Amino acid sequence: MESRVATKLGENIKLFRVVSIFFLLLGLCMASWSINESYSRTHLLIVTVIGAVATCSVTLNLNTSWAASESFTCRVTAP
C-alpha cells in the first residue's frame, strides 16, 4: 500500500515539474515580448511553441538522459 502511494506521489511531482517548467518558459517569452512592442503575436506564438516542445521533450526524457550520462561517466572514470 505504501509503495502505491509513493508511486502516485512521484507521478504527481513529475506532472507538476512539467507544468511548472512550461509556465516558466511562457513567462519568459511574455516578459521578453512586453519589452519590445514591435514583435508580432505570430512570432510570440512560434517561439513559445518551439520552446514548449523543446522544454517538454527534455523534461519528459530526463530519466533516460540521466541514465545515459551515468553510464557514460562510469565508462570514463573506470580504471
Image (spheres, grey):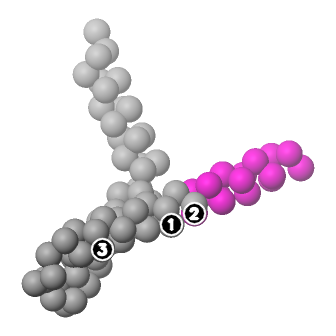
Q: Amino acid at mark 1?
A: Val
Numbered tag placed on residue 15 in the rendering: 2
Secondary structure at badge 1 equals: helix
**Could you give the CA–CA distance between mark 1 and mark 3, rounded to whole angstroms?**
16 Å
Camera-nearest residue between 73 and 31: 31
Any part of residue 75 in sight: yes
- 43 displayed left or right of 48: left
Name the residue carrying label 1.
Answer: 19
Name the residue carrying label 3.
Answer: 30
Image position, residue 32 (x, y; %): 22, 69
Q: Are marks 1 and 3 in contact (CB under 8 Å)?
A: no
Image position, residue 48 (x, y; %): 28, 76
**Pair 1/3: label in front:** 3
**Could you give the CA–CA distance between mark 1 and mark 2, rounded to whole angstroms?**
6 Å
Secondary structure at badge 2 equals: helix
- 58 displayed left or right of 42: right
**Quadrant in the rendering for residue 54:** bottom left
Residues in magenta? 1-15
Disc with the residue nearer the chain's start (3 vs 2): 2
Q: Is residue 44 magenta?
A: no
